[in-house]
Image (cartoon, grey):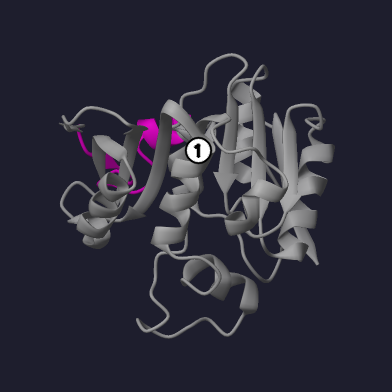
Amino acid sequence: MTTTDSLFQGQLKIIQKKKGYRFSIDAAILAGHVSLKAADVAVDLGTGCGIIPLILSLHNPSAHIYGIEIQKDLAELASRNVRVNGMEERITIVHGDMKDFKSYLRPGTAGVVFSNPPYRSVLSGRINPEAERAVARHEIKACLSDVVTVAECLLKPAGRFVVIYPAERAVDLVGRMRASKLEPKQLRLIHSKQSSGAKLVIAEGIKYGNPGLKILPPLIIYKPEGGYTDEIKKMIGE
């Protein structure tokens, strides 16, 4: 069973499973922080249903985006979403393990790599009994080190890596990026409400970049009275 949702006043149609993995606001937030240039080659590590490539392709029709997904059912769903939105010439969905990327992508060819990776250790918390959600949220098939290492290999010099991750693991993220020569250049903390602590962090790194980190103003998801803030509404096309 699937559902069909619309974004950006119906410009995008997103088919998702009624049960199983479904994209969250995190994906739209990440897409809102990825800037592409004309003719860029970009890669999404762990694309799920393809939501982030779809959003980016809507706004950047000249770029070509690869979405890599290890789970067969999700890869097939992502391919279906690409066809439904008529983006076959802009987006390529690959069913495979990101760690085996050399079988379908050459190292050093991407201008941008982005990811909303699994962020929970298999030893932390209860693993979701639904397999798709478990793999998407827990480091079962890929861990942070895998994602950052693959990103570094895929990127050309001065290429950009953009990732969304739990704020509580920001030190792990920044340390791993720097160790892989993806110098952290921008960080932005994401809060559910103005009065709450940071829930997530968006980080952008530059391959072989010089040291120098810019902390951007925080992003607030919900208004005090309820409902999304104007910035979040823009990211989902409301």
Magenta residues (range): 217-234
Query: Relative to residue 173, is residue 4 drawn left or right?
Result: right
| Residue that sits furthest to the top in the current view | 38
Observer-nearest of 171 and 218: 171
Q: Residue 159, image x and y in percent?
A: 44, 28
Q: Secondary structure at mark 1?
A: strand
Q: Is residue 122 above or below residue 234?
A: below
Observer-nearest of 167 and 179: 179
Q: Is residue 4 visible?
A: no
Q: Residue 122, image x and y in percent?
A: 42, 80
Circle 1 residues within 10 Å: few <14, some 14–19, many ≥20: many
User: What is the number of callouts on the image?
Assistant: 1
Residue at image location 41% in from the left, 51% down from the top = 148
The answer to if 225 sits in the magenta stretch is yes
Query: Relative to residue 10, is residue 133 drawn left or right?
Result: left
Q: Is residue 136 above or below residue 66?
A: below
Residue at image location 50% in from the left, 38% down from the top = 113
Q: Which amino acid is tagged 1? A: Val
The answer to if 95 sits in the magenta stretch is no
Q: Is residue 200 above or below residue 138?
A: above
Residue at image location 18% in from the left, 55% down from the top = 196
Q: Residue 80, image x and y in percent?
A: 82, 47
Quadrant occupied by the N terminus: bottom right
Residue at image location 45% in from the left, 33% down from the top = 32
In this figure, which residue is indicated by the disc labeled 1?
113
